[in-house]
Image (cartoon, grey):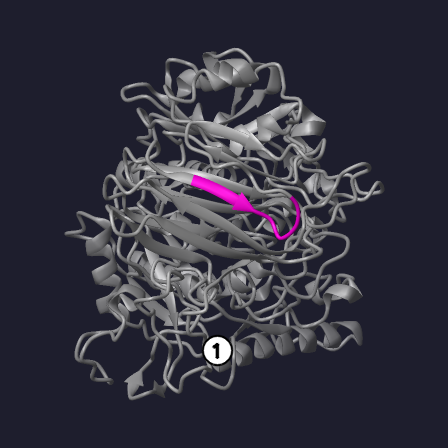
Amino acid sequence: MSALPAEWTRLESAFSTHPLDPYLVWAIATDFRDYADVLESGEVPVAIEMKAGIDCRRLGELPGVRLSPLYIDDVEPLGLQGLRHATALVRRDHLVDTLLSASIQRMELGAPIARSPSPRERPDTRRTTDSDTSEPDPPAWKPQVVIGIVDDFVAFGHPRLRDRDGASRVRFVLSQDTEAPAAIDPGLWRSLGIDGHELCTIGVPPDRLVNAYPKVLPRATHGTHVADLAAGCDDDSDAVRHAEVIAVHLPRSVVADTSGGAMNVRMLDALRYIVRRAGPQAKVVVNMSFATTAGPHDGSSILERAIDDLVRARRPQRFAVVVPAGNAHEARGHARFTLDRTRQEQLLHWQIAPDDLTPTFMEIWLPHGMSERVGVRVRPPAGPASPPLQGPRVWLDPSHAAPAFGVVFLPRVANGATGTMILVVVGPTVTRRVGATPAPHGLWTVELSHDGAADIGEIHAWIERDDSMGPQPAGGRQSAFVDPQYVRPGQVPEPPADGALAYVKREGSFNTIATGEQTVVVGAHVPGMRNGRADPAAGYSGGGPNRPPGRDGSDFTAAGEESATLHGLRAAATGGVDTVRMNGTSVSAPQATRAIGRLLVEQAAVKGVASAKTLREQVRDQVSPRGGSRSRTGPAHPLREGLGPLEGKVSTEERRLAIARSSAQRRQSRDRARVGQPSRAPDPDLSRDIDDVPSNRDARREPPSGGDDMQPMP
């Protein structure tokens, strides 16, 4: 057994009395070895739900806790008083005291998992304390409709994101990295302390705006592509051009950690920032094109509850949050089975990849009250297995000073409100840490059993995402269940379905943050006819059913591909003339965001909207009127397709031509100015073209296809 930190004894005594986050328990037990930013800063980012009737602003009164101004300032004018969810930074020496505070209902870890770093790498994920209070506040701004984009870098000076006067419609940008952005002119960014750095484009001369870009700019970013699909426009006839934009750039470490370890903290901070900057008078729709796979899948995670409460506080007719269904339908990352009096054991075979620089996680969700009836045992491909374990128990592999694997089995967890969860952790299968022993790769086996005295009920297991996204440095490698009864695509002529004998199920392979009541969830379809169906769901697009009382599946679908043979949708790259193709449900979600934004602009007030469900139906009717050009008998897979497909009004080819046309006009005007010829019209573009910003040659290659994971998961 590894040496445990001093606070372990107090924490262990709370296993049966408090709902605890198994990830946080594992991090404390292993002294935060996988969380480089915590080791460097000495503070732990957490997402917190207060007990009923306690305002989240009370968090700031606890010793060793720093609460962001996003949860303190302008709360009453925005109608957010009484909300119980917030994020905070907690000093490590106050962590257990905060966790066991009488005012806190539950708390989740919100730190990104770092790749096992080389000695030359220094992660810059700290949330520091400095704030330049001498900088003036941005000018007053009262928009009517705002489209929020929460993603990686958004090219806020792109021609598709400008108004008719050439000014950027992206009025505010928040970079959540607390170190100043590596911009050509860092002085354009204003420090917000622990919340990051802010850029206000209002009143910034166009010839200076380009200097807020990074010194080295990749050819394409996920955020720019998504922003173009959600809000890009150069035609005044499109109502979406009258919507203004707020962008939040997630830290690179958060984007690289596809397990979503920090997503709860960063997403909640981003939503509060957008609401605060938009103001109480604005109607807002926010796009969050990210997905993870493990979690309760019943709408009870802290982030999902926080989103639901925020939408209700701001009212569904004035605030909407759009998320993708996820690309995990064929990922072999979900298992579902039943243990009862006739079936006392289930083996889960788990293929762990070699050369994985990050830990790998499996969550096993049990019905309520069954933690003392079920046992778990983990067998690695080589070396001794764990003993049979029952909760409450935390077991760490004793074979090495740094445990290669472990199990956290608690009777109550903070991650969900229904039942409990067993967390199985396998360490990196390759490591750069001096003295660390990598975990063995290969086929692991997780055994679940009970004595047969009672029916346990339905059990779910999810493998967390662990791949490497887009142009991010290689880190994780996705693991998967192995089930001989699982029929993979290509083994049969028709699209495969879940078999009764297989414990690995496509059903329930759904985005973890998409099972709340108030979110708008969008799957992906492939335009055209296939197997006698119009616009069928894409093979990777996730769906339900989920664990009750969570939602069953998507609200509707939007195109995730150009066609069955032309993959991806074309939209803006970071340069003014360039376009790239990306696919997946994360390019479907912004099309629904665009439809909602158009609806908010075209209707002075969205009348009769009492719930998110009604809003979804209005959007569906606006974009795809019932009885339209294509007759349908209803979705073939209602849990994946919801109300059916949205039919966009602008094709990706038209979008490509519009980008090329506006860029050609801009270049022509600039060239005339260089040779002394009069321009046909004033050039509203930046005097230094965005296309002229130097690009990293390694990043100029076409990014891999994919949506929230940049490629359909295997």
Q: Nearer the viewer, residue 141 or 178?
A: 178
Q: In this orientation, does residue 694 appear?
A: yes
Q: Quadrant of the N terminus?
A: top right
Whether residue 697 sits left or right of residue 457 in the image: it is right
Front residue of 661/250: it is 250
The answer to which quarter of the image holds residue 401 is: top right
> Residue under circle 1?
652
* Residue occupying the point 50% across, 25% down: 69
**Residue 295 visible, this orientation:** no
Please determine whether, in this image, residue 264 is positioned above or below residue 31: below
User: Residue 371 location, x and y as percent?
Assistant: 35, 34
Query: Please, is residue 218 above or below residue 117 in the view?
Result: below
The answer to whether residue 199 is left or right of residue 667 is left
Position of residue 293 relative to residue 117, above or below, is: below
| Residue furthest right as drawn | 120
Q: Position of residue 18 (x, y in %)?
A: 38, 21
Which is nearer the eye, 538 or 466?
Answer: 466
Depth check: give the residue in front, 381 or 76: 381
Q: Magenta residues? A: 376-383
Number of marks in picture: 1
Secondary structure of the residue carrying tag 1 is helix
**Residue at x 51%, y 84% (from the top left corner):** 566
Where does the image place residue 674, in percent across and percent down from the top left? 79, 72
